[in-house]
Image (spheres, rainbow, N blue to C red):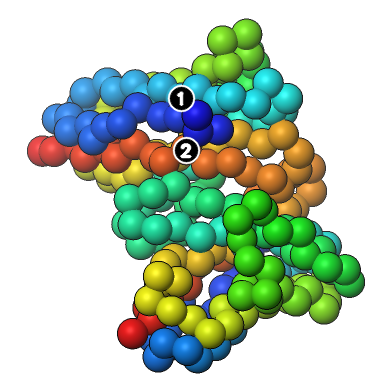
Amino acid sequence: RKEVEQDPGPFNVPEGATVAFNCTYSNSASQSFFWYRQDCRKEPKLLMSVYSSGNEDGRFTAQLNRASQYISLLIRDSKLSDSATYLCVVSSRPGDMRFGAGTRLTVKP
Amino acid sequence: GAVVSQHPSWVICKSGTSVKIECRSLDFQATTMFWYRQFPKQSLMLMATSNEGSKATYEQGVEKDKFLINHASLTLSTLTVTSAHPEDSSFYICSALVGAGRAFFGQGTRLTVV
C-alpha cells in the first residue's frame, strides 16, 4: 500500500465548477499535512497547510480527518489558472515529506 | 521569502558520465536539505536527507554509492549521479526546511542520459 494515495484523476471541469480531491495516508504517526500544486515540469509549490479544524484560503478549503487518515481539498469557482497537478503531502517529521502521486486538474473555458 | 536555487535546470549527459546538481539556500541557512526524484506521471520520491557536516541518510532502495550527496556548508548541498545510465533520467528536486517545518523547493533539474 502506498503511503499517500490520491484520487486517480484526471479531472476535467468547466470554469466556475466546484471540484474536490481526496487523499488517504497510511502512517498514523503523521503530524503535518499539506496540499501542493505542481505545474508541468516545475517544482511543487505550497498551496496550503491542512489543520485538524479545517481551513480555508479564498476559494480553497482543506479538511483533515485524523481518525480516518483522510485529507480533502475543495476548490470552488474554478479558474483556468487552477489547472495543475495537486499533490497531497504528509509528514511525520519536519522535512520528511511523503507525496501522493498527484491528481491532475484541467479547467476548461 | 525563502528561496532555494537549484542548478542546472536541465542537463543532458552521456551514459557512464557523472553529473553534479547543486542546491543552494539563498537567504537562509539550511542544516537539512532533501533530495527527491520524480519520474513522469509519478509522485516525488524522497531519495535522501542531506545533513550539513555529516553523512546523508538514504531511503531504502537508493544506492548511496551511485547518488553521492555532499552538504559541506549551511547553504549548499550537492547531488552527484555517478556513472549515469538512461534509467537515471528523471526530474531531481531538492528542498530545504525553513523555521518550523515549511519546505521550499528548488526549481528542479531535468536529467537526460543518452
Residue at 49% x, 51% y is B44
Q: Is residue A18 above or below residue B107?
A: above
Dots 1 and 2: beta carbons under 8 Å?
Answer: yes
Q: Which chain carries label 1?
A: A
Q: In which quarter of the image is residue A16?
A: top left
Residue A91, quarter of picture? top right
Label for residue A100?
Answer: 2
Let me know if marks 1 and 2 both belong to one chain.
yes
Residue A23: numbered disc: 1
- The earlier-in-sequence mark between 1 and 2 is 1
User: Residue B103: image x %, image y %?
Assistant: 65, 50
Q: Which of A38 and B35 is in front in this view?
A: B35
> In the picture shown, does residue A21 fall above or below B29?
above
What amino acid is at disc 1? Cys
Residue B54 visible from this viewpoint:
yes
Q: Mark 2 lies on which chain?
A: A
Q: Would you say A3 lies left or right of B27 here? A: left
Give the total number of marks visible in the rendering. Answer: 2
Residue found farthest to the left: A109
Q: What element carries label 2?
A: loop
Residue A93 position in % (x across, y down): 76, 39
Q: Please, what is the three-letter code of the amino acid marked with disc 2? A: Gly
On-image quarter of the C terminus of chain B = bottom left
Compared to residue B85, the image places residue A85 above or below, namely above
